[in-house]
Amino acid sequence: MLKKAGVLVMALTLLFGSNLMAGDQGKTYESRDQIPEKYKWDLTPLFASQAEWAKEREAVEALIPEFKNYQGKLATSAQTLQQCLDFMTDVLKRYYKLSAYASRLSDQDTRESGPMAMRQEISQVGNKLSAAMSFIEPEILSIPQDVIDKFFKENPKLAVYRQYIDNIQRMKPHTLSPQEEKIIAHAGLMSDTPYDIYGIFKNADMPRPEITLPDGKTVKLDDATYTLYRADDNRDLRIKVFEQFFGAYKQFERTFGTDLYSQLKKDLFYKTVRKYDSCLEAALTPNNIPTSVYMNLIESVNENLPTLHRYLKLRKKMLGVDELHYYDMYAPLVPKVDLTYSVDEAEDLILEALEPLGDEYEDVLKKAFNERWIDMFPNTGKRSGAYSSGAAYDVHPYILMNFMGKYEDVSTLAHELGHTMHSYFSNKNQHFINAQYPIFLAEVASTCNEALLVNHVLKKIDDPKKRLSILGNQLETFRTTLFRQTQFAEFELKIHELVEKGEALTGDKLSRIYLDILKKYYGHDAVTKIEDLYGIEWAYIPHFYYNFYVFQYATSLCASTALSEKIMKEGKPMADKYVKEFLSAGSSDYAIPILQKVGVDMTTKLPYEQAFAKMNRIMDEIEKLLEETEK
């Protein structure tokens, strides 16, 4: 349960959080005092002051020893089980509220030592709380199913915990004896080592090359500058950036290979001791996602690689190059397009775009804007990127932005509002224990908002160049989220299968496997030239240490595409269903059934086919616009 507060923010920031470091008109404020009050989040609904927070932290910490009153007793009666879970719920709600306040304070100015200390203090409380509660799930797991059924009949107040208890009981075939579980818990002390080594080496110790820019300036080519200059419109610079960036990774191919192989062996260990048929099943079963959903995604994407190849040929035409290369993937399709918005214009645009979602949705959006749920502008010391956090159950969600006035910022705001509304409606309509929506659904509401925004903006813009820019951005979303994440998922599946067969994997072998998949996806023989050096790209991707996580970015985009199209086509009935049965569902059911209730079945190929069809319609429109501009 303690993972709830941080895992979503981390996941979103890793892939969707942008490093936005400018203000409404490209300005970063030196001090938060310079920012108008209405554009800064109001944290007083959490706590009126840091002193009040400190008092509550002491009170919550004082409650932790009381968990001992329930230890060893959960199977004795329905009332005891219910009282323990009620107590756990109360303490966790208060803990998450404390954590939310410390995190928001710290993120608004990371230079401040006080909020950082608060964050560390509440983290220590969390460790104590986690240890104190550690008996609860094993004890529930040990209660026979017939006794659990009897408890539900005897005590109606237990009903709110049915999904929570069923989910624990569901894992019984993969739970070992208490002594074996204790050994596995101790082994967990080593489980993060491969990722820790990867992070330290990649982010701190790995030597990085320097490149000279066309203006004569020399910069170190780390991950951040690579992301910046791979999108430069100077092709010679892009070539140099790709060669030197991936050349640096290639020098440490053996080191990265040994480390990732260690991660794969860790996954194999847990798969084996917990009696799963595969590493994939071990990763997906805790979230109750059938392995067929994963395989269905890879199969559907492979069947539709011609759609990606069509886009790549269109990219080649729009860039005006004789031969498309991998270093051309991030070059702007339509350079120097000026789409700028003030915050007020962005808010109005989002309200208009999301109007199809109904009056209640619009009313909550207005509250978010008017009641200061959002910290809008960058200031010196503020955390970069963007996120939404709805961890404080009894208080509205909060959004961190770094708004710089570009269309991308408007889209990011709509995206984060999707998360916020998902949290808001789930918290409002579900008991705390069922309020956090499944991670499989995390990106659906956010990307649905993006789709509705694009649809609305295109209705308002006639300028062909601006339309091409927005449509091109949509295609890039499909390439990087649907195709690229599935490409990662296919690589991840392949290397786990090889380890399951007993094969050793070296850095060189990993590069060859990755290169073959990369060439297949990008049509090396006829569409995009892929240099062998880029086989090392796997070493740049941290998500391969997240154990079959990335596929969910692709499935979420396909689900949101299907939902946004249904909302635009069917109107109010579908919008009402979306709010009531999807946004309000939390984790009251598992992810796949929640989507099925709103007409999206991820166990079939239909959502994927709808996504590919939309991509082809976008390309049809781009080709039509290009024909018109060439006349």
Image (tube, rainbow, N blue to C red):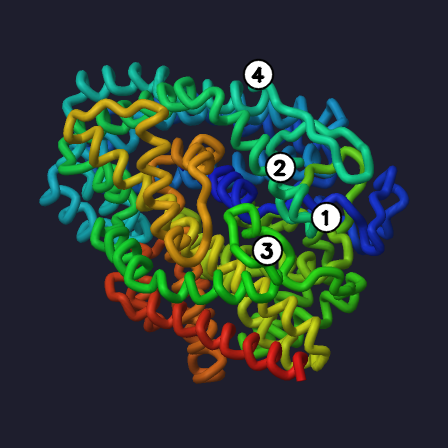
* Residue at x 41%, y 53% (from the top left corner): 522
Residue pushed farthest right?
A: 34
Q: Residue tagged by mark 1? A: 402
Neighbours of disc 4 within 10 Å: few (<14), some (14-19), many (20+): few
Whether label 1 touches label 3, CB < 8 Å: no
**2 vs 1, front mark:** 2
Is 311 left or right of 58, judged from the image as shown?
Answer: left
> Gap between marks 4 and 3, in whole Å?
34 Å
Neighbours of disc 3 within 10 Å: few (<14), some (14-19), many (20+): many
**4 vs 3, front mark:** 4
* Residue at x 24%, y 40% (from the top left corner): 280
Amino acid at dot 4: Asp
Residue 167: x and y in percent read 25, 45
Asked where in the image residue 594 lies, by quadrant, the reply is bottom left
> Gap between marks 2 and 3, in whole Å?
32 Å
> Gap between marks 1 and 3, in whole Å?
12 Å
Q: Earlier in the sequence, mark 4 or mark 3?
A: 4
* Residue at x 82%, y 38% (from the top left corner): 215
Is 487 left or right of 104, judged from the image as shown?
Answer: left
Q: Is residue 240 above or below residue 418?
A: above
Amino acid at dot 2: Val
Q: Which mark is residue 416?
A: 3
> Gap between marks 2 and 1, in whole Å?
27 Å
Q: Residue tagged by mark 4? A: 205
| Quadrant, the C terminus | bottom right
Q: Nearer the viewer, residue 142 or 67?
A: 142
Q: Secondary structure at mark 1?
A: loop
Q: Secondary structure at mark 3?
A: helix
